[in-house]
Amino acid sequence: MISVHLNTLRVNGIRAIFTPSLLEPPPDLPEPTIMRHESPQSVCRFGIARGDITPPVGIYHRMWGAATHERAAGVHRPLVASAVVIAPLSSAATDNRALITLDHCLLGETEIELLKSTIEEIAGTRAKQLLITFTHTHGAGLMSLDRKNLPGGELIGPYLREVASRCGQLVLQANEQLAEATITYGMGHCSLATNRDFWDADRKQFVCGFNPSLPADDTVVVARVTNEAGKILATFVNYACHPTTLAWENQLISPDFIGALRETVERETGSAPCIFLQGASAEIGPREGFVGDVAVADRNGRQLAYAVLEALTALPPAGTTYVYQGPTISGATLGTWKDEPWSEARRAQASTLAWQNTELALSYRQDRPSRAEVEATLEKQQQVELEALAAGDQAEARDAHALVERQTRMLRRLDELPPDQYPYVIQAWRLGDAIWLGVRGELYSGLQTAVRRAHPETPIIVMTLVDGWGPSYIVPRESYGRGLYQESVAVLAPGTFEQVVAAATQLVNQLIGS
């Protein structure tokens, strides 16, 4: 039995009985102003298709400079490609957008053009409607056509043509699946991501590895897609963390931690496809990484999956607003809330779709090496490698080969760079209450923290490596001249990172105001 303590007072000689909970609030307490709580959502037509793109065993796999193997020896987990098509509710609208995600590290300009042209030929989706991105796993192998003369390299060309064709078919299938859906967004945190700019005080140099002294952005943005019956069609995970659990000792084709992430999430969501979107992770990687043990990659994936599931579990029913219902007298006076269906005005707001791009002309760094300088350095390192092999010094040969790889990849970057300035495109989609932002290359997490700080009430999905590596790393001004790996391979001038952040923020501002 619940008893309520009563108090009495006399007003004009009349005895009154009251409970403290029914008193007017003291004048110094603010009146409650939030009676409705909206969860950010998007309403659109949505279609998705996914397919296996696992390369054949024996394909060229030497992603890491320190690796000593050439060919993939087996498969840890399958690689997949996903195609998502998003369109306005009006069935007459033809201005759709397609998102392709691939379980690969990255692709160069030539390989990206193969993808785009094949997708347009098969599905009719033009390049301006297409956003291609990568999970950035470093366990899939280096799929570069300039490796065709290396062991297993002869398989790269046929494989990439097959992947391009598969992606075109997936876009077709996703278009066929277009139906009304609601995307509901949430946010969580996961400690898998750690800073990886570590100062080795003994050797007086920066290395790329776990730095316990600096924090990392641990934000997880999740999105759940449901149809009109409430069935989950897909989930999205936007998180910034290099998939570098597996490194030079690993000889297996692997999606790294993304494989176990997908498996764990999909087990709880009725097998709905889970799509990983790589955030701005230039300086972020897993605490435990650079190993050959696939069990570590799976453990890292489960760690992220549990954070994702926590955030997904907290999401409200699609198409609802959480509304205050008023007080209920009980042992305490309770304030009750309830999910209520949207009004037509709220639904129209969540159905607003808009696409916008901006292009920057970014300057190259003045100390960028010339092609002749890189070739000269490459020739010297190749000679060192040959001499080490002749002497039977495997450790020296491995280190020399890693330096050869650095110069070989720099040559490819220089060959693919446009002259004078780099034309840098930023893509942004407004989907109802959310923004999806796509940028080229690898950027420090300051990009995503800046745009999200400017709009804390708006879920902003930040996707990097859109259309490939492009200008490679884009690093903050203060990173230059410190000896960081990211700065050593960057080709853009100091200040370009800040230009990209400012332009991305302005683009988001415009879309939110539209």
Image (cartoon, rainbow, N blue to C red):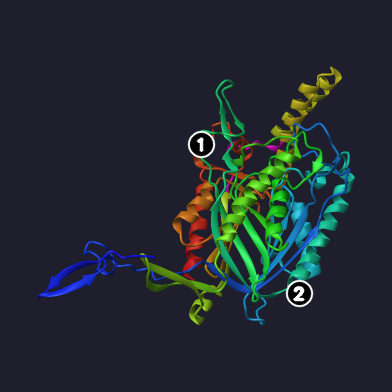
Left or right position of 149 against 144 = right
* Place of residue 418 in the rendered image (x, y in percent of width and height, measured from the top left): 67, 50
Q: Can you say whether 464 is above or below 216 in the image?
A: below
Quadrant of res 118 = bottom right
* Residues at marks 2 and 1, CA–CA distance in whole angstroms: 47 Å
* Residue projecting furthest to the top: 391
Describe residue 259's horizontal placement relative to residue 390 as left or right.
Answer: left
Can residue 65 be found in the magenta stretch? no
Q: Is mark 2 on a helix, strand or loop?
A: helix
What is the x, y in percent for residue 207?
A: 61, 30
Relative to 237, does residue 296 appear above or below in the rendering?
A: above
Judged by its main secondary structure, the magenta piece is loop
* Residue 354 showing in the rendered view: yes
Q: Residues within 10 Å of mark 1 (few under 14, many from 20)?
A: few
Q: Can you identify the residue that label 2 sits on?
A: 176
Q: In this figure, which residue is indicated by the disc labeled 1?
A: 214
What is the magenta range? 363-372
Give the mark nearer the N terminus: 2 vs 1: 2
